Amino acid sequence: MEKDMEPLLRDYLNKIKQIHPIVHCITNTITVNDCANMVLALGASPTMAHHTLEVEEITAGTNALVCNLGATECLEAMELAGEKADALGHPIVLDPVGVAGSTFRRNKCMALMERVHTTCIRGNYSEILALMRQRNTAVGVDAADTDMDLDALQQFADEVHGIVVASGEKDYITDGKRLYVCERGHRMMSHITGSGCMSSVALATFLAVEPSIESANACCHFLGQMGELAAKQTEERAGGTMTFRELFWDAVSFQGILWLSIHLEMWSCNPRSMRRAFLRPILILKR
């Protein structure tokens, strides 16, 4: 991890532990469990309420909202929760799942964006390009594009008055004025279902403690670094994608809870030291 990023990340992770934000996730049934576990691993609390008769009340008591277009059956709930969160000034993360290959989803996504001001839009290259170009750019929900038009990306962020994160081999994070590039991560992250959805709820967790582009950038770097760490452990164990998934969650939870007492290399270099560090009081985070 870059030296100048470590203190900033430590600060954000400490804030998450101290504030313990509640993140309201309206997400798809395929990844709902993964998203809940990601929020928990970071030290926050997830709630997954989807019913139209309760989402306004639920989101009023939370700190951030995630609207995932994979849950097309919950579009009305997203509108209601989004309007409530917007009125309360809560960060809102929009994940435009599948808009690259579905005109229906793209139109609904654009309608939601017109109705609710989103703090952050996070999608893969094809999804972000589909919103920018207003046409299909892929088939299915996986990215087909490997390049991103950075000038157009910044213009799009400026138009929506928010943060846009284009996830891919490199993550591009912009608010229209500033552009950050995150080159962390590992290809195995794209081989498990829900890596993008988990990234979106992680972004909401970071933005819940500070709704800024710096917070979004730190989140992308953190997840990328944890993916690299999990991939190394997976290779050492001759494991596959299920091993990687579990080690990725472990990496997020260990680093999130004990950032001050654990160096990133410790887990891979000396597992016994990792276990000893885990036994240290979590209160060390308050120093």
Image: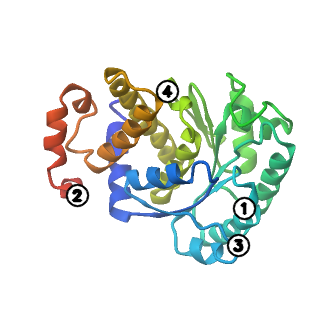
Disc 1/disc 4 C-alpha distance (Å): 30 Å
Disc 3: which residue: 52
Residue 202 visible in the shown view: yes
Residue 1 visible (yes or no): no
| Kind of residue at badge 1 | Cys
Residues at marks 3 and 4, CA–CA distance in whole angstroms: 36 Å
Q: Which mark identifies residue 265?
A: none
Relative to 220, 230 lies left or right? left
Q: Amino acid at mark 2?
A: Lys
Question: Which residue shows up at 54% across the image and 39% down it?
Answer: 195
Image coords of residue 98 (percent x, y): 74, 41
Which residue in the protein does label 2 denote?
A: 286
Q: Earlier in the sequence, mark 2 or mark 4?
A: 4
Mark carried by residue 188: 4
Query: What whole-number distance in Å separates the C-alpha atoms at marks 2 and 4?
Result: 34 Å
Q: At numbered mark 1, what does the secondary structure look like: helix, strand or loop?
A: helix
The kind of residue tagged 3 is Thr
Q: Disc 2 to disc 3, how far (Cα)?
A: 39 Å
The mark nearer the N terminus, 3 or 4, is 3
Mark 3: few/some/many CA within 10 Å (<14, 14-19, 20+) = some
Quarter of the figure with residue 132? top right
Q: Which residue is mark 1?
A: 74
Kindly state the secondary structure of the residue where label 4 is placed.
helix
From the viewer's perspective, is 201 left or right of 7?
A: right
